[in-house]
Amino acid sequence: MEFLEVNCPPLPQLYPNKAALSHGQTQTQLKNITKTSNGSALHSYAEYECPDGYAMRGKSPPYFICGYPNGSKWVPDLAEKNFYCQAPGCYASDVLHGNFSHQWVPANDSNEINCDAGFTHDGINQIKCIYENGNYTWDHQGPYRCLPSCQGNPCGPNGRCQISQDNDTYTCDCDKGYRMTVNGSNRTCEDINECTDHIDLCDSITSTCQNTIGSYLCICNSGTEMYENVTMNTYNFPNNKSLIFDRSCIRTRCPIPQFTEYMVTTNDLFLNNSSVTYYCPKALQSLTMTCQASVWSKPDENFCTTTISCPKPNVTISTILTPNNTIYSVYDTISYSCEPGYTLIGPNETICLETGWNSNAPICTMQKCEDISKLLQDITYLNVAVSTPPSPTHESWIKGTKLHFSCENGHVLNGSSTMYCSDATDGTLRWSENTLPTCE
């Protein structure tokens, strides 16, 4: 029967490859493997040791065993080993509000204590590494600390350094728009970003916040301006909230238009980018003016100069027109009436539209007595002579008309020989006789 030879891989000559700081320089901590029981064969034992003057430190012993779990390997796992050699000398300690210049110095060397900004040494700024009673130690034992001094104003140009009452640290009395920030022992005054911290006074509806060094700006949106030296004539002041000087944005507006005739508007604010409309009924056209940068756009100088008109209606001589013009504009109205003694027949009013008058003109006829021409024809043997006064309309049976009656030969007139058309007590015209004469 043959047996397989099982070996572990070679161990590194220097393991682990740790280092200690010596004034910023590295140095090897471990020697080569000093002891092995059987090389790298199974169950062999390998041990490390430190160079002369160094002490072994760590959480695990400095040796390995070549084992055989799932194949040959050194146990414990190399990555799990934690041992190192500590160089002879002194190592840095904690310093309140400061630090040592070097993490390690050899014996008889000194290490400086550095203080943070705004702090100074507590009487000691340098200590020396000594070997005493078999140990390396500092010639001055801690605790080590730096005291607040405000030297050089660590708060920066935007604040004033103030030492705390317990003399343990310092604070910064920062200028307006700045606040104290703490980074370890350091305290400085830094700009407050009012915008990202949402402590600004800008109205998000009318403006945008923009941070500046030590303050912030409210950048007004289009159509608004900063509330500064303003007047009611060019700005619209909201009445539902407070205004803040140099922070509130006011919606700008135009002055009240001087030309108000035919103006159609829904309110009297006249804000920027708003418009007013004018309607000219004479020309059946409209005009729009826009408020831009608190100034009205220039109106059309010819607006409402060209008109649509209606001619004077053709009426009878006795018709009275009110008003009595030669030309009438669109939507002008005429009232009709008659001269005394005439009666209006037709509409008493008409309107000029873009298509002309909305109705035909009326006529005025003279007042008359009852038309008795047919009655006279029915009376036999009666002769009638009619005397009609002159009139513009040449009408019959008007006021002043006179009738003369006579009978044919051989017949006798029974009744009055004359009749007159005259005014009655009720304002109408009536014949002077109630009945017509007859011939017998």
Image (cartoon, rainbow, N blue to C red):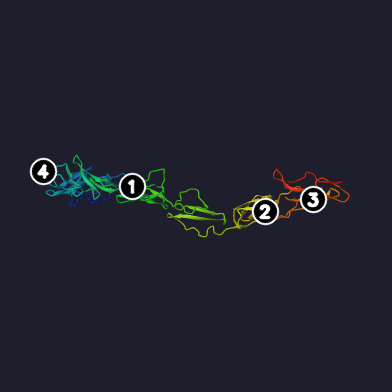
> Which residue occupies the foreground of this view, 252 or 32?
252
User: Label 4, label 3: how many angstroms apart (C-alpha)?
Assistant: 173 Å
- The residue mark sitting in front, 3 or 1, is 3
Of the two numbered discs 4 and 3 on the same chain, state the one appearing first in sequence.
4
Using the image, tell me which numbered label, if any, was put on residue 413.
Answer: none
Choose top left, top right, bottom left or bottom right for residue 139.
top left
Disc 2: which residue:
318
- The residue mark sitting in front, 2 or 1, is 2
Of the two numbered discs 2 and 3 on the same chain, state the one appearing first in sequence.
2
Disc 1: which residue:
194
The mark total stands at: 4
Disc 4: which residue:
132
Residue 30 appears in the rendering: no
State whether residue 3 is above or below residue 285: above
Marks 3 and 1 in Cβ contact (< 8 Å): no
- The residue mark sitting in front, 2 or 3, is 3
> Which residue occupies the foreground of this view, 323 or 425?
425
Q: Disc 1 residue type?
A: Glu
Disc 3: which residue:
404
**Quick one: SS at disc 3?**
strand
Q: Label 4 crowding class (10 Å Cα cut-off): few <14, some 14-19, many 20+?
A: few
Of the two numbered discs 2 and 1 on the same chain, state the one appearing first in sequence.
1
